[in-house]
Image: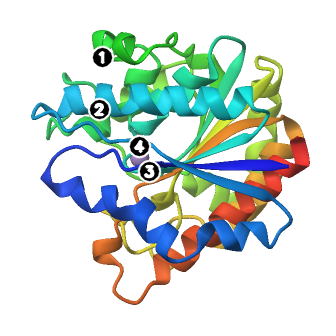
């Protein structure tokens, strides 16, 4: 199986600049070789981040290049794993997959479902799932390409910190939601299987979006907003395995690792394990 690592150092705002360094850190740590040991033919390509002074212009530019890279990998019958960068890489990733009934499995401690109206901070990367589903920044999404994803084709897993209005909007939306608390309460299969079966009936394949902060800070402390009460590595491995048992993975992204906060390399080691989990899931459904 051919596996394309797409380095996408796209991040907005000064607090996020560390995330743009993640792809380079993965490369220095030999991520491609670690995956190659598992029998994958690993290729690496790099997307140029936008250099525009306006953050949203940079997001549009970087994600347009990312969409083209995802499209090329998919056309070459290779599995695209996008290495962010921030969570807005979902926009280019989905645009690159093109039309068709492609769902989204979104793993994240946060909703990423704010809009300019509900956001307390105005922080753009609190909004990418709302942008992807067409709730806001329609013009920006249009510049990157692709259709808005219908809400009932999205499953959000692992939430444990939502802004008040963001939470109301998420729970009132068509998105399937399995919060972290439910996973810790009843375990992976019981908490996830019903939602996965609903999603499977509505889509032909899924894009797996994995914000590394879905994990508990014990495993992935080097993130902008560490939030206790997250998934363990075993939980995550079981989740990725179950998702790929139920439906084929078409692409994935790993986001929000900030190497400038990772003095002892704990989160880097975790991230490489997560790439291996994704590779195993992709191979399972390939
Ligand atoms: Mn996120």
Q: Which residue is mark 2?
A: 59
Q: Is mark 4 within 8 Å of ligand 1?
A: yes
Tell me if the residue at label 1 has its CB under 8 Å from ligand 1: no
Residue 24 versus residue 252 in the image, above or below: below
Q: Position of residue 195 (x, y in %)?
A: 74, 34
Counting residues from the start of the chain, the first of labels 2 and 1 encountered is 2
Q: Secondary structure at mark 2?
A: helix
Q: Which residue is mark 4?
A: 87
Vertical comparison of 55 with 173: above or below: below
Residue 114 visible to an observer of this rendering: no
The dot on residue 140 is 1
Camera-near label (4 vs 2) is 2
3 and 1 marks in contact (CB < 8 Å)? no
Please state which of residues 70 and 247 is positioned toward the viewer in this rendering: 70
Mark 3 secondary-structure assignment: strand
Disc 2 and disc 1 in contact, CB within 8 angstroms: yes
Mark 4 in CB contact with mark 2 (< 8 angstroms): no
Asked if 121 appears above or below 232 in the picture, the reply is above
Q: Earlier in the sequence, mark 1 or mark 4?
A: 4
Query: Alpha-carbon distance for marks 2 and 1?
Result: 8 Å
| For discs 3 and 4, the disc positioned in front in the rendered view | 3
Residue 167 coordinates in the image, percent (x, y): 38, 35
Q: Residues within 10 Å of mark 1 (few under 14, many from 20)?
A: some
Seen at 66% across and 56% down, the residue is 183
Q: CA distance from mark 3 to mark 1?
A: 19 Å
How far is mark 3 from mark 4, CA to CA? 7 Å
Q: Is residue 244 above or below residue 177?
A: below
């Amino acid at each position: 199986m051919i596996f394309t690592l797409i380095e996408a150092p796209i991040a907005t705002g000064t607090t996020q600049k560390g995330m743009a360094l993640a792809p380079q850190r993965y490369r220095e740590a030999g991520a491609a070789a670690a995956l190659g040991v598992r029998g994958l033919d690993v290729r690496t390509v790099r997307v140029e981040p936008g250099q525009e002074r306006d953050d949203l212009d940079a997001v549009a530019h970087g994600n347009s290049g990312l969409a083209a890279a995802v499209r090329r990998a998919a056309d070459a019958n290779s599995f695209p794993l996008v290495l962010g960068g921030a969570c807005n890489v979902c926009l280019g990733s989905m645009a690159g997959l093109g039309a068709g009934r492609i769902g989204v499995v979104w793993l994240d401690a946060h909703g990423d479902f704010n809009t300019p109206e509900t956001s307390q901070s105005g922080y753009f990367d609190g909004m990418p799932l709302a942008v992807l589903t067409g709730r806001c920044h329609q013009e920006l999404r249009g510049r990157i390409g692709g259709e808005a994803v219908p809400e009932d084709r999205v499953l959000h897993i692992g939430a444990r910190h939502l802004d008040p209005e963001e939470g109301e909007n998420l729970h009132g939306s068509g998105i399937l939601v399995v919060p972290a608390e439910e996973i810790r309460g009843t375990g992976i299969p019981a908490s996830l299987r019903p939602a996965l079966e609903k999603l499977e009936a509505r889509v032909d394949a899924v894009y797996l979006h994995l914000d590394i902060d879905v994990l508990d800070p014990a495993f992935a402390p080097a993130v902008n907003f560490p939030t206790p009460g997250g998934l363990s590595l075993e939980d995550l491995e079981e989740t990725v395995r179950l998702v790929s048992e139920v439906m084929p993975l078409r692409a994935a992204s790993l986001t929000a690792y900030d190497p400038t906060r990772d003095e002892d390399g704990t989160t880097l080691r975790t991230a490489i394990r997560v790439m291996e989990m994704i590779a195993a899931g992709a191979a399972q459904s390939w």
